[in-house]
Image (cartoon, rainbow, N blue to C red):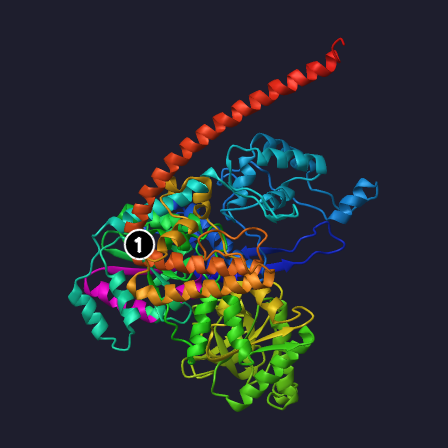
Amino acid sequence: REFARGLADRYGAAVDFAIHSPQRASNIRNHHAHLMMTTRAVTADGLGDKTAIERENKWLLARDIPSSQVQLREIRQSWEQIANEHLARTGLEIRIDHRSHMERGLEIEPSEHMGVHATQMERSGQGVARARVDSETARRNAELIREKPEQVLSIITGEKSVFDRRDVARALHRAIDGAEAFQAAFASVMASPALIELQGERRGPDGRIVEAARYSTHEMVKIERGMVLSAARLSETREHGVAERHVEASLAARPFLSEEQREAVRHLAGGEGISVVVGLAGAGKSTMLSAARDAWERAGYSVHGAALSGKAAEGLEQSSGIASRTLASWEAGWSAGRGELGKGDVFVIDEAGMVSSRQLASFIGAAEKAGAKIVLVGDPEQLQPIQAGAAFRAVAERVGFAELAQVRRQAEPWQRRASQDFARHRTQDGLAAYAERGAVRFSETRDEAIDAIVRDVGRDMRERPESSRLVLAHRRADVRELNAAIREARQSAGELARGEDGGERRFMTNDGERAFVAGDRVIFLENNRDLGVKNGMLGVVSEVAEGRLSARLDDAEGPGRGRAVTVSLAEYAAIDHGYATTIHKSQGATVDRAYVLASEGMDRHLSYVAMTRHREEARLYAGRDQFVDLRELSARLSRSGAKETTLDYAERRGIAAEFGVCSDIEVSREVQGRAPAADEDRAAAARAGGRDEARHDRQAQGQDGEKASEGSQRARPEEDAAAAQRRQALIQEAKLAFYKSQGAAKAREAFQQAEARRAEEAERQRVEAERQQEQQRQEEVDREQASRQRFRGPGPG
């Protein structure tokens, strides 16, 4: 529906769509949709002129309108973005690519699969309704993959920069049937010269695998290496400085900015061709960007904004005054020769932590080519990129950054400290702070935890109706259950009317039938320019009628205090109850109180977002049927879902000098005793914390006499997982502090040192290889002599 509405809005045409579910009587076993669009625009008088996509290119180009081919590409890009956003929202890892296999350089043929049970029936001779549409496709794919295994690797690296053997197996399963063909193709892929092993398999003392081998491709290494080198070159330029008088004038107009925000503005006003700001959740990034925009414009620069999603782009524009569009929109315009950057431009990417390596590399390259300045703003610890890589983190580590670490959203100092814990990988410490104050609440079951949320939210709405609140869950199924339960409780308490006599009306929405009545919370789930609503906006229903719903949007004054909106459900059906929403949809939101349902699929990034949306209070609810106790809850919610880049493994493979980067090992060793003055307290606390945690770990493991590392070496596989995680958090914090203070200059110094180490290591490896070869030759001689002796038998006497 969202895609169809976008077509209708763009071309002024009528778009009809039908969504088909699998039917027993049909051979089609997948959900799919059919769309039909009029070739002429729809006007008040009927059908009008041809739509732009139906015009000849000669007519289009004469009017500076993209050709029909470019328009089709933009439509395909739009579908990719919409589909992938919805896939991510439902917790699915699979992604689509709008490009054809041919455009991607792939020769693998698309195919359809039947289920495992149908396959078993077919092999046993039983009849099945549908087999693979073209069994020859599977055979041809198997042969192709044996000949060109890099085809599968291209598919995998569309989603991940770094992967393991399981990712290879999953990709092969999409293209190949049959155990023998699968095994042959798997062996071919793992032996491909395009594959590079970044880290070998690691085993514990008992021989079990504790860390799988990690791989990438030479192409991804080249992309990510090129990205950081391009960023490094931009960081060396000094052509985009803003005069001090302009910066100070902008700051003087905003006396409410903190010193940290002021320093970030000064950092962005520097002459470098690239600037990075790492801002924790609630640290005031938007307010800071408004001041930076003012300074740039005073100096005569044109400032442009971009973000991955439409909602984020709209949020950037509203909060900072920077005219913004989606990254896909910018790419489509550039491919059509429109809106290209120039030397007088500043290009700001917000929520940059969600952008993939390929895409960010493209934008950094475009800025370098045009001589423009590019600014990256985000938090690498919030929600991760949908596609491959962790580009924002890699670039921030390479060129240095300003940091907004002073959390301003939460009212209580202990909550602000906890927010920093969540941001710094110390999820267990952040949860412990809330648990100590009774804000982590266990019930015997998940269902009872939902009941507890319903009771607490109901009480909050009655006692503080003017306050804002959000109920958050990871899974959409949980969100639907929470919405239904909260609404039912309000109706039972007489706070909402029930039935047609009370004014309740039922509507068919995109997600099925929903009942609404005045006073209901409502959420809008699609962008709509005519209504002025964006995906994720919330409001309070003021009136319902047949086929129509009116609501007042939330704003800074409170729930339902904003602009009035009236929706015709025949034209816009992307609404749902708005008492609860997904954690993904809440990124960037701020409310007075948050109520969070813990679930098994959550990781530290989701926990970070969920537990930092509030100003006054946050509560986390869990069932003991899913999490036995606080220790298990903390361990599960501390898991990393972080995307990786090939740069993370550079030092381990002896190629740090080629990349020009330092590893965690190098940084942690160099930073000891050399923390900048501004960071001495934090570095000391980190070291003290490291000693405390190491001592507790030794006690827990019965190793009191053994001295533990404070982060200068990686955790051994047999170490306790929680201890390893805390150690890695200290390493990462030291690393961020190091790059913040030293930036590109120190990275260059590390580059030179790494080159020297690489030369020494290469010589050592050469000598060791020769020694091993000589040893192998001697062993072969010894074996041959022993074999001959056995064949001859004992000598005479």
Give left or right: position of 590 versus 251: right
Residue at x-position 37% and y-position 53%: 397
Q: Nearer the viewer, residue 262 or 549?
A: 262
Prevailing secondary structure of the magenta residues: helix
Residue at x-position 52% and y-position 23%: 774
Numbered label tally: 1
593 lies above or below 700: below
Which residue ends up furthest to the top in the rendered image? 796
Give x and y (percent) for residue 518.
56, 85
337 lies above or below 543: above
Which residue ends up furthest to the right in the rendered image? 125
What amino acid type is highlighted by mark number 1?
Answer: Gly
Give x and y (percent) for residue 609.
49, 68
Quarter occupied by residue 146? top right
Give left or right: position of 640 versus 372: right
Do we see residue 283 in this rendering? yes
The C terminus sits in image quarter: top right
Residue at x-position 52% and y-position 63%: 695
In the image, the segment drawn in magenta is 287-314
Q: Label 1 belongs to which residue? A: 743
